[in-house]
Image (cartoon, rainbow, N blue to C red):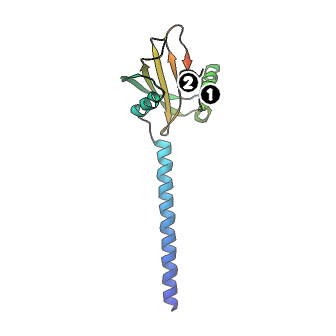
Amino acid sequence: MSRKGKLGIKQIALFVIIVLVLVFLVNFTVNYVKGCFGSVSAEDAASFLKGYGWELDLKDCVQDEIVIPKDFSEVYERYNALQLKQGYDLTKYRTDTVIRYTFKVRNFEGYENALAHVLTKGGKIIGGDICSTDLSGIMTGFDGKTS
């Protein structure tokens, strides 16, 4: 084979390698951006809660942004202890703005004024609770038992 033919094969091989690297980088970047900026919709959050058996008033869903504080007060420490029991950890999100969905819960036995909160960030659920706003109210994990 001539020198010209060998150079062509090397150029083709280099081109193929560059294309493969670019495809990998684009795929990685797209998935990274989705993870950082993806979102959980109110319907997604409601579906998640329904998986635990909760009956919700979807029309009254409230979506707001909250900031997880850098320094946790005693109240936030207790709230994060609840999150840890259900497999979440809000310390990873200190100073982050997260989305909180709030739903009215119709079937929290023994409590008339019950709410479900789902915290989301970057396309995933990062925590939340089921609570009663009654005077003798309680706060539990998504399962209604973890406190």
Q: Position of residue 113 (x, y in %)?
A: 45, 13
User: Going from the N terminus, do you reach mark 1 or mark 2 first?
Assistant: 1
Q: Position of residue 95 (x, y in %)?
A: 57, 32
Crowd tier of the residue under label 1, counting other residues whose Cα lies within 10 Å: few below 14, some 14–19, many 20 or above: few
- Total tally of numbered discs in the picture: 2
Q: Is residue 134 above or below residue 9?
A: above
Task: Determine whether, in the image, residue 36 is placed left or right of residue 104.
Answer: right
The residue under the point 51% across, 59% down is 25
The residue under the point 47% across, 67% down is 19
Q: Nearer the viewer, residue 60 or 74?
A: 60
Q: Residue furthest left?
A: 59
Could you say which quadrant of the image residue 63 lies in? top left
Q: Is residue 108 above or below residue 40?
A: above
Question: Which amino acid is tagged 1?
Answer: Lys
Say if residue 100 shows up in the picture: no
Q: Is residue 85 above or below residue 112?
A: below
* Element at label 2: loop
Q: Position of residue 92 (x, y in %)?
A: 60, 36
Q: CA distance from mark 1 to mark 2?
A: 8 Å
Question: Which amino acid is tagged 2?
Answer: Gly
Task: Determine whether, in the image, residue 17 is placed left or right of residue 105.
Answer: right
Could you say which quadrant of the image residue 83 lies in? top right
Which residue position holds label 1?
85
The residue under the point 45% across, 42% down is 38
Say if residue 14 shows up in the picture: yes
* Element at label 1: helix
Which residue position holds label 2?
141
